Image: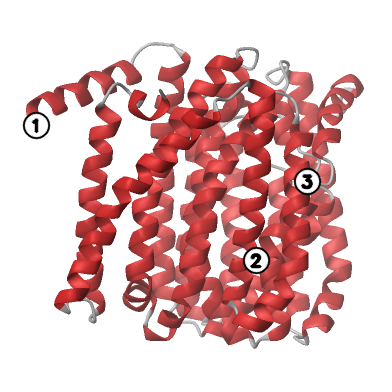
């Protein structure tokens, strides 16, 4: 049986890695982006393990405010230039690539000037004079992001994922290394801010080295109009996304000391950071894939069913693991003072899993040229977040911020499922099957962890984590069996 399974994996990998079919190109792209993401995430994970033992929680709380304020301003001038270029049939043309560069440069320059002027207001609101200088320095990161070679975006459209991975993840690793070095020298929040700027600087330099491009002296007006016509569908989307993603930071920062916010942010970022990169990884590969078959609804649905089933097969056992071992994991990784943030981590994990699955439907909307459908979803999530965040944080403490986020993502996810069923004729019973099978497989983790608790082998962090990992190993073994049975036909009908 083991030999037969190995042969199936070998044949499947050989088919996926060879040829010029859409499936093969997407798989190869996923491998490159996945390897880059793993390296970057491993470096970020190691960085945080080091920094939590060097820097005080207040530094992470202050950095959370800096990043949230920067993201808030950036959302007001988001024009969706990257997505417009990838979605456009003319996305590889020099005129459109040059027009995209001017759109990105104009946006980033405006952002930096606004942030420079408004930094003292944010400093006054939170009663922290240091925020003015921190925000102004962090703003240079936005400026560098805006002048990257837009041939980097075109590389995504053309499925040249090796280049995309080298630029994106290479810059991330460079930023991580800079932050670690500076933390031993500065030992405060400035190490985090300068590391963020260094990360964007590295990506900017790599984009021109790997995807050479000379910005044109003039832009093509027709190309600008075509790109902005797509942007009308995403107008306001970034603002609504920001409300959903960052409201918890703004509210908790106002209601609690920076040290409390720092512990909360580190715990939540433990799951949100890899989630962001998983969404980016899947978006980077699935957006071009869906775009290539945007007129074939049945094929789009088959891709969505397989990707979503795989997400739940891999994600649900990990979610159960965090439920039983979250406190132990935080204690071992970051230290005892971060173990108290286990519940924010667990709730954030639930929201993150649903967010990853929801993002695949969003990618289909973008590929079909209907981003306004996703905008309605995010508007609903933003409204739910604004209504529920303050009372939930007041009643339950910082974990209330993640409870509000979970409620919001459930509302948005259900709305998007209903929309995609109408848009492409997706079979809801087939879509639901992947979730149910994944849940049944994840029960193996529950059984192992509960049995260990009955024996009393869960009080120490390391043994508790090992027991949880053993349960996950059983679950993933079962998941592999499902994956090998007819290429997910057991889940997708």
Q: Quadrant of the N terminus?
A: top left
Neighbourhood count class around disc 2 (C-alpha, 10 Å): few under 14, some 14–19, many 20 upward: many
Residue at point 57%, 49% (across, down):
355
Q: Nearer the viewer, mark 3 or mark 1?
A: 1
Q: Earlier in the sequence, mark 2 or mark 1?
A: 1
Per the image, the residue denoted by label 1 is: 2
In this rendering, the answer to whether 98 lies above or below 146 is above
What residue does disc 3 label?
237
Residue carrying label 2 = 404
Q: CA distance from mark 2 to mark 1?
A: 45 Å
Residue 242, picture quadrant: bottom right
Query: Residue at left 67%, top 70%?
Result: 248
Q: Is residue 19 in sight in this rendering? A: yes
Along the polypeptide, which appears first: circle 2 or circle 3? 3
Q: Residue 201's spot in the image, x, y percent? A: 61, 52
The quadrant of the picture occupied by the C terminus is top left
N-terminal label among 3 and 1: 1
Between 378 and 435, the one nearer to me in the picture? 435
Q: Residue 351 appears in which quarter of the rendering?
A: bottom right
**Residue 360 appears at what percent x and percent y?**
57, 36
- Mark 3 → mark 1, Cα distance in angstroms: 49 Å
Foreground label between 2 and 3? 2
Provide the secondary structure element on which disc 2 rests. helix
Label pair 2/3, CB-CB below 8 angstroms: no
């Amino acid at each position: 049986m083991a030999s037969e399974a190995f042969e199936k994996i070998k044949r499947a990998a050989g088919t996926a890695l060879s040829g010029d079919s859409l499936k093969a190109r997407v798989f190869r792209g996923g491998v490159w982006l996945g390897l880059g993401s793993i390296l970057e995430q491993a470096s970020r994970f190691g960085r945080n393990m080091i920094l939590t033992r060097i820097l005080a929680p207040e530094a992470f709380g202050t950095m959370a405010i800096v990043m949230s304020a920067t993201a808030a301003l950036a959302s007001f001038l988001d024009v969706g230039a990257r997505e417009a270029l990838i979605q456009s049939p003319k996305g590889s043309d020099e005129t459109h690539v040059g027009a995209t560069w001017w759109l990105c440069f104009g946006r980033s320059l405006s952002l930096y000037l606004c942030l420079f002027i408004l930094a003292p207001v944010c400093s006054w609101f939170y009663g922290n004079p240091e925020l003015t200088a921190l925000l102004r320095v962090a703003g240079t990161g936005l400026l560098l992001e805006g002048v990257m070679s837009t041939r980097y975006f075109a590389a995504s459209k053309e499925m040249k994922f090796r280049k995309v991975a080298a630029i994106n993840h290479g810059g991330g690793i460079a930023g991580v290394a800079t932050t670690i070095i500076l933390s031993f020298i500065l030992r405060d929040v400035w190490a985090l801010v300068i590391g963020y700027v260094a990360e964007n600087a590295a990506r900017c330099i790599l984009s021109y080295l790997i995807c050479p491009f000379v910005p044109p002296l003039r832009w093509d007006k027709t190309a600008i109009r075509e790109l902005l016509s797509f942007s009308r569908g995403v107008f306001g989307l970034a603002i609504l996304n920001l409300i959903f993603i960052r409201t918890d930071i703004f509210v908790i920062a106002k209601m609690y000391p920076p040290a409390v916010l720092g512990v909360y942010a580190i715990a939540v970022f433990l799951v949100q950071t890899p989630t962001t990169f998983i969404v980016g990884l899947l978006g980077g590969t699935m957006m071009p894939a869906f775009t290539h078959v945007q007129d074939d609804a049945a094929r789009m649905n088959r891709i969505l069913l397989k990707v979503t089933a795989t997400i739940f097969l891999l994600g649900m056992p990990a979610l159960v693991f965090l439920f039983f071992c979250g406190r132990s994991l935080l204690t071992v990784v970051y230290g005892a003072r971060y173990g108290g943030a286990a519940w924010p981590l667990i709730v954030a994990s639930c929201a993150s899993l649903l967010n990853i699955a929801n993002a695949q439907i969003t990618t289909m909307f973008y590929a079909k040229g209907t981003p306004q459908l996703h905008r309605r979803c995010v508007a609903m999530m933003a409204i739910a977040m604004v209504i529920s965040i303050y009372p939930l944080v007041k009643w339950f403490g910082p974990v209330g911020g993640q409870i509000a986020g979970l409620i919001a993502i459930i509302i948005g996810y259900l709305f998007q499922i209903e929309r995609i069923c109408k848009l492409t004729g997706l079979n809801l019973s087939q879509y639901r099957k992947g979730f149910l099978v994944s849940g049944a497989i994840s029960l193996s983790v529950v059984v192992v962890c509960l049995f260990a608790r009955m024996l009393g082998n869960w009080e120490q962090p390391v043994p508790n984590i090992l027991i949880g990992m053993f349960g996950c190993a059983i679950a993933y073994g079962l998941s592999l069996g499902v994956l090998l049975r007819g290429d997910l036909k057991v889940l997708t009908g």
